[in-house]
Image (cartoon, helix red, strand yellow):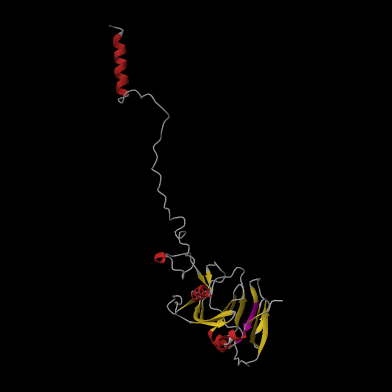
Amino acid sequence: MTHRAPLVLSLLVFACQNPAGPPAAKSGPEVKATEPPAKSDPHAAAPHGANPHAGDPHAGGPHGAAGPVETKRPAREAVNPHPVTPSGQTREEVVPGLNYKVPEEWTRKPGSSAMRLAEFVLPGPGGDAELAVYRFAGGGGDAKSNVHRWRTQFAKSDGSPLGDNDGEVQEVSKPPLTVTLVDLSGTYVAQVTPGASERYSDPNYRMLAAIVEGAGDPYFFKAVGPETTLAVWKPTFATFADAITVVPAK
C-alpha cells in the first residue's frame, strides 16, 4: 500500500498537466489543410480568341463581339495635287495574256510584287491616285465576291460599310471576256496590309476598278485615290472594256 501511493499521485499530476490525454498514434503521413484551388476563368487568357473575325470591324462577328484593338492611320496628305485636263490620247499597254489602253497622262511604274503585273500613277486635283493590275494564281475569287469585299473597305458617314446596293457595278460582255466595272466611294478603311490591325482612314476616297474574266485566271484593274482625282478619270473606266483584248496565243 505504501508503494502504490506515489504511483497514484504521479498519475494525477500528469492528468492535470495534459487534460486532452496522451497524443493519438499517427496512422499515416501528416496532411496539412490548404485553400481550395481557385477556379480558372476560361475567357481570361484570351477574351476575344474565340471570335475569328475579331480583327475586322466590318466582318459582322456574333452579337458585335469586340476584337483586338485596331489602329487607324492618319488620313494621307494629297500628293502633287494639280488640275488635269485629259487629252483623250491613249497608249497601248500589255500584261501577260492581255492588251489594253490607258490615257497618256498615266505614268507606268514597275509592278512591286509578282501579283502586281503593272502599276500606274493617276494625276489629278485631289492628288495622285494609284492603279494596280493584279492577277492571282488559282483565280482570286469571282467578281461578285470581290465586289462584296471591296465594299467592306469603304465606310459611310456613320462608320458602317457600304451595302450591297451602294456604288455602281456594271457588267459588260465582250466575248470571250466579261468585264465588271466597279465605282465605290466613301472613307477608305482597308487594312494597310492583309490581316493587319492597322487600317487606313482616308475620307473622300474612291475606287474605280475592272474585273476581267474569260482569259484564264481573272485580271483585276484597281485604282484607289482621292475622289476628285478619280472623278477626272471616270470616263476612262466607262469605256475601258472596249479597249481590252486577249493576246493571241503563239
**Residue 122 is covered by the magenta coloring:** yes
Specify the quadrant that holds the C terminus: bottom right
Identify the residue at image location x=31%, y=12%.
6
Q: Is residue 34 above or below residue 204?
A: above
Q: Is residue 93 above or below residue 10?
A: below
| Side (left or right) of 93 relative to 62 | right
| The furthest residue to the top | 1
Looking at the rendering, the stretch of residues picked out in magenta corresponds to 118-123
Q: Foreground residue, 69 or 16? A: 69
Residue 51 at what x, y percent from top left? 45, 61
Examine the residues drawn in magenta and state their main secondary structure: strand
Residue 194 at what x, y percent from top left? 56, 68
Identify the residue at image location x=48%, y=68%.
56
Residue 234 at what x, y percent from top left? 55, 87
| Quarter-of-image position of residue 237 | bottom right
**Residue 59 is covered by the magenta coloring:** no
| The furthest residue to the left | 1
| Side (left or right) of 104 relative to 154 | right
| Side (left or right) of 13 relative to 62 | left
Q: Foreground residue, 245 or 240? A: 245
